[in-house]
Image (tube, coloured by chain):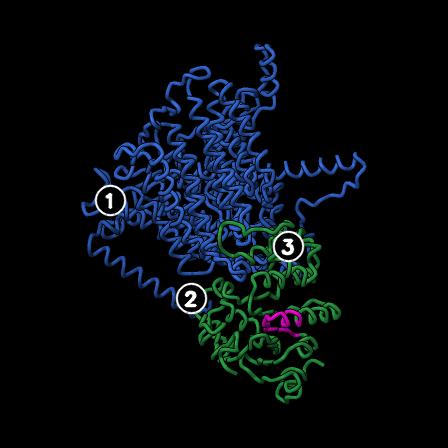
Chain colours: A green, B blue
């Protein structure tokens, strides 16, 4: 794959916490407009990898985003360049309404509000609200919502910043099977709209079903990678991961 | 920490200590002779700091009122020892309200009985009995603090707990000032002064200081042993790590917290008595403010290690004594004839900032069962009507009422401006500042100097003063990039003390202790200083134009702050307050928002400071001291820390404000009570109603609206003003 086609590329990304090596020289590519999965057993270093990519953990190696080296950029600059993320623990702004949560991400700098359209709502956040079916509850406070809805608000907030890539840390954790399938559909629609996704999840059904390409982490290092069908049949992956979870 | 590391650290520390001591001795033996003079105050700081560690380990509260407890108990002891009585807190006499109304109706001869000021226990007490009773009082105080204040607040955010302990400090201080005035009182020494201990090399130690030092070292060792080897210590350590875990194992974190509170309060109280005896006197503010170096020492000990904490406290006070000695040398920087003031007082700030920067991480946060959020910050709406109506009422008041009320409204406007600065910083961005009046003072002193020395005219002087405050705010804001919550409160209170001593009391930078003049404002021939004779209204002072000017500044800033709250920047401030990580992930420059908020808030406080300077015609250190900053936070929090309306209500509550005048003129409650009432109100607000009076107002408003809808035949659905998550006791 050529670099220009990759929205994200990591080269020998290494994260250390004290003496523990959470990620050991991990190099991956996320092509533009693709849905790439990252799987691995608990403690494989998935979340620390996402933290490193998005600027929340110190790392060595290189992170290239949209053809630019962002290794030394702080988290908020990466976000403004179009590298969004969601959190396993949702992390909404609980004192702001759902629409304000999105508006914060939609306009992370500047002092004056952007011009609003005639209907009174800002057009820039109506798309993510629509896409995730949140328009009805846009005036509610996050604390009033169910866990599933809160997760969707988290995704909508990431979308509001008009990202090129979203790193999703376990978006399906805590969702039931129906909600998880629903989420899968929505993710595919995002990709169809031209947004790339790096999906980290435990839900093998979801990952195998929606991803174009999958990386497998074990003990902080890359174990295997390939299309879902290849990964499913790879013996080392089965031994490390799939075999343990019937 | 492993045993070998502890041994190694101890050896290194001892070697370093010996090396420094040898160096000091070889250059000038007097340095050592003076250094040991710090042991006495070092003991007290150590005792307060140990109490801080105990309460933090036991309940997760950083108790700013720790020094105040020591001070309070020393007064209890002294009263028992001298007069054999227990003084009562001077609660406002409920009868005085009836009296006030009766007097208002013309029954001037009505005299109702007063509340007793003390309970006589018959004659002066012997030493042992007085000590024992004081110990009982200390324990009761600790128990009351836990059960009445901090237990109900166990799920409150750290800011609310800081605020409650600040309220406690203010209350204890106010009670003592009201009973015994702010002047020092003399205390009967416990020890008969025998010949001081003479060590080789001409080192002389007063025997009482030796005794206190030995006592504190003994207490430190026993606390360490208790926490290391007893079941109680183990349980407290477990509860500090995880309350849930402790509950699962069958311990009650609540009872552990209570015991730790009582222990720490006993410790502070007894050492307060010992120090009062050594100094033969006690006063309401010296010991109270020793909590600042104690916080520094506790931070060195990470709020966990008793030995490190005590060592740091002794070290800090000994270095202070050394600096005092250096002040007598010719090479020491001098300001005029006197040694440069404030260097000693700046030491805790240096230690605190150094520790926080070196450690990088903030205090360990307690893994509590659940935690509430900061007070709700509503989006201000109906801005026009909510601005015009109160402004019109205040303006009419200024133009029709007598001079007392005019002064009260002017004071209220100035106070509300400072409260507004706290709303931006603490209410919107969640950064606590206990240095707001110090920042206001920076502006006031800058204005004075620019106007007197350089002759800067009216609008430039105050604006330059406020800009200087903004710069100072920026400096204080820099640690806030890494330092959060309670730690930030510690940094800002130390900064406030340092600025007060280093800048305000420094003759070469400002007027020194006497303060400095501020010429009245002039603008194209308009004279609107508070003491300029006025031609309008009753012609008396203060000049109503000055009040109108303060009101105009307040209205302008209020509208500005409300507009900012509604702007994208306002949303961003709240986002940072809620969740810094998620804010950064949404593209917000968290550092920029924090620093910007600090600078803007300091600018607003600075404008308040310059108005206050004009109001008094001078600037003095007392007007901008730490305790004034704390009262200001009390007023702002009581009014409602997270809304512009709250700041306005806060302005009413400051001393000299409208509500103090109402109390005085209608109910004959003396203005001295303002601090006491503010402190009590602060505690009650923090415990029961974190949204403040403005929040209570809002709740009442929405309930009324619901009622109206219901009466009209609507459904009367309750619109949640603020949804609180139900208690989740997962354990």
- Is A43 magenta? The answer is no
> Which residue is the extreme one toward the right?
B713
> Which residue is the extreme one toward the left?
B330
Q: Are marks 2 and 3 on the same chain?
A: no
Task: Point out which mark residue B6 bears.
Answer: 2
Which residue does the numbered mark 1 point to in the structure image? B327
Separation of marks 3 and 1 at Cα, in angstroms: 60 Å
Residue ID at (59%, 70%): A195
Q: Are marks 2 and 1 on the same chain?
A: yes
Task: Point out which mark residue B592 bears.
Answer: none
Q: In this picture, which residue range is highlighted in magenta?
A: A188-202
Which residue does the numbered mark 3 point to in the structure image? A98
Separation of marks 2 and 3 at Cα, in angstroms: 51 Å
Residue ID at (41%, 16%): B535
As displayed, is residue B286 above or below residue B614? below
Q: Nearer the viewer, residue B3 or B514?
A: B514
| Among the 4 quarters of the image, the one containing residue A173 | bottom right
- Bin the neighbour count of mark 2 within 10 Å (Cα to Cα): few under 14, some 14-19, many 20 and up: few
- Bin the neighbour count of mark 3 within 10 Å (Cα to Cα): few under 14, some 14-19, many 20 and up: many
Residue ID at (67%, 52%): A140
Q: Chain of mark 2?
A: B
Separation of marks 2 and 1 at Cα, in angstroms: 36 Å
Q: Mark 2 and 1 residues: CB-CB less than 8 Å, in contact?
A: no
Mark 3 lies on a secondary structure that is: helix
Closest to the camera, between mark 2 and mark 1, is: 1
- Is A199 magenta? The answer is yes
Mark 1 lies on a secondary structure that is: loop
Q: Earlier in the sequence, mark 2 or mark 1?
A: 2
Q: Chain of mark 3?
A: A
């Amino acid at each position: 794959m050529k670099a220009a086609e990759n929205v994200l590329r990591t080269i020998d990304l290494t994260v250390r916490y004290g003496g523990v090596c959470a990620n050991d020289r991990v190099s991956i590519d996320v092509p533009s407009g693709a849905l790439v999965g990252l799987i691995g057993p608990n403690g494989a270093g998935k979340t620390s990898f996402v933290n490193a990519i998005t600027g929340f953990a110190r790392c060595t190696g290189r992170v290239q985003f949209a053809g630019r080296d962002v290794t030394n950029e702080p988290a908020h600059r990466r976000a403004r360049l179009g590298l969004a993320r969601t959190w396993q623990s949702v992390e909404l702004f609980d004192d702001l309404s759902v629409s304000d949560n999105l508006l914060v991400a939609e306009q992370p700098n500047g002092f004056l509000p952007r011009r609003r359209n005639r209907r009174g709502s800002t057009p820039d956040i109506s798309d993510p609200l629509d896409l995730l079916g949140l328009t009805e509850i846009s005036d509610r406070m996050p604390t009033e919502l169910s866990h599933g809805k809160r997760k969707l608000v988290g995704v909508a907030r990431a979308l509001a910043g008009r990202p090129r890539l979203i790193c999703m840390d376990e978006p399906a954790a805590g969702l039931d099977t129906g909600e998880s399938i629903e989420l899968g559909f929505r993710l595919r629609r995002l990709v169809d709209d031209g947004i790339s996704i790096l999906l980290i999840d435990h839900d093998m059904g979801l990952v195998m079903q929606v991803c174009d390409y999958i990386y497998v982490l074990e003990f902080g290092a890359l174990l295997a990678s390939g299309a879902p069908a290849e990964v499913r049949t790879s013996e080392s992956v089965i031994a490390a991961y799939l075999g343990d979870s019937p | 920490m492993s045993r070998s590391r502890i041994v190694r650290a101890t050896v290194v520390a001892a070697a370093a200590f010996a090396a420094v001591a040898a160096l000091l001795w070889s250059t000038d033996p007097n340095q050592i002779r003076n250094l040991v003079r710090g042991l006495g105050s070092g003991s007290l700081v150590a005792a307060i700091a140990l109490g801080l560690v105990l309460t933090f380990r036991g309940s997760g509260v950083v108790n700013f009122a720790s020094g105040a407890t020591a001070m309070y108990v020393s007064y209890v002891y002294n009263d028992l020892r001298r007069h054999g009585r227990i003084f009562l807190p001077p609660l406002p006499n409920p009868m005085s309200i009836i009296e006030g109304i009766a007097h208002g109706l013309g029954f001037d001869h009505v005299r109702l009985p007063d509340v007793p000021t003390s309970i006589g226990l018959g004659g002066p007490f012997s030493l042992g009995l007085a000590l024992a009773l004081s110990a009982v009082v200390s324990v009761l105080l600790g128990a009351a603090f836990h059960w009445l204040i901090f237990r109900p607040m166990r799920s409150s955010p750290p800011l609310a707990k800081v605020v409650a302990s600040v309220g406690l400090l203010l209350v204890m201080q106010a009670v003592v000032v009201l009973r015994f005035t702010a002047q020092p009182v003399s205390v009967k020494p416990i020890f008969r002064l025998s010949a001081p201990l003479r060590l080789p090399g001409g080192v002389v130690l007063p025997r009482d200081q030796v005794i206190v030092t030995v006592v504190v070292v003994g207490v430190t060792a026993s606390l360490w042993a208790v926490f290391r080897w007893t079941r109680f210590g183990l349980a407290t350590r477990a509860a500090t790590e995880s309350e849930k875990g402790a509950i699962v194992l069958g311990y009650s974190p609540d009872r552990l917290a209570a015991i730790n509170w009582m222990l720490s309060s006993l410790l502070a109280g007894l050492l307060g008595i010992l120090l009062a005896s050594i100094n033969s006197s006690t006063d309401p503010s010296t010991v109270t403010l020793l909590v600042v170096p104690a916080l520094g020492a506790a931070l060195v000990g990470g709020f966990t290690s008793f030995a490190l904490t005590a060592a740091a406290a002794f070290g800090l006070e000994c270095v202070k004594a050394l600096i005092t000695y250096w002040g007598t040398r010719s090479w020491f920087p001098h300001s005029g004839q006197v040694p440069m003031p404030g260097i000693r007082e700046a030491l805790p700030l240096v230690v605190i900032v150094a520790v926080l920067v070196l450690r990088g991480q903030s205090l360990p946060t307690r893994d509590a069962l659940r935690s509430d959020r900061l007070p709700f910050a509503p989006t201000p709406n109906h801005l026009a009507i909510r601005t015009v109506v109160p402004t019109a009422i205040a303006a009419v008041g200024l133009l029709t009422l007598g001079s007392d009320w005019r002064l009260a409204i002017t004071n209220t406007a100035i106070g509300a401006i400072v409260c507004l600065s706290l709303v931006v910083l603490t209410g919107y961005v969640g950064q606590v500042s206990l240095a707001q009046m110090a920042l206001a003072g920076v502006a006031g002193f800058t204005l004075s100097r620019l106007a007197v020395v350089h002759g800067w005219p009216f609008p430039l002087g105050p604006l330059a003063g406020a800009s200087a405050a903004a710069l100072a705010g920026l400096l204080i804001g820099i640690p806030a990039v890494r330092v959060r919550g309670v730690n930030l409160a510690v940094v800002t209170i130390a900064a406030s003390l340092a600025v007060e001593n280093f800048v305000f009391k420094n003759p070469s930078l400002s007027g020194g202790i006497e303060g400095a003049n501020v010429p009245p404002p002039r603008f194209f021939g308009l004279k609107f200083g508070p003491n300029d004779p006025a031609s309008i209204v009753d012609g008396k002072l203060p000049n109503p134009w000055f009040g109108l000017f303060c009101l105009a500044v307040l209205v302008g800033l209020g509208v500005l702050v409300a507009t900012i709250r509604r702007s994208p920047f306002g949303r961003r401030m709240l986002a940072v307050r809620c969740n810094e990580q998620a804010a950064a992930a949404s593209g917000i420059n968290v550092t920029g928002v924090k620093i910007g908020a600090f600078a803007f808030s300091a600018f607003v406080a600075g404008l308040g400071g310059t108005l206050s300077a004009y109001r008094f015609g001078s600037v003095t250190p007392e007007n901008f001291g730490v305790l004034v900053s704390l009262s200001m936070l009390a007023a702002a929090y009581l009014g409602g820390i997270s809304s512009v309306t709250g700041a306005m209500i806060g302005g009413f509550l400051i001393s000299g404000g409208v509500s103090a005048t109402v109390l005085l003129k209608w109910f004959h409650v003396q203005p001295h009570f303002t601090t006491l009432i503010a402190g009590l109100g602060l505690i009650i607000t923090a415990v029961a109603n974190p949204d403040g009076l403005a929040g209570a107002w809002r709740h009442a408003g929405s309930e009324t609206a619901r009622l109206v809808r219901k009466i009209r035949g609507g459904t009367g659905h309750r619109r949640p003003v603020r949804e609180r998550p139900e208690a989740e006791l997962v354990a």
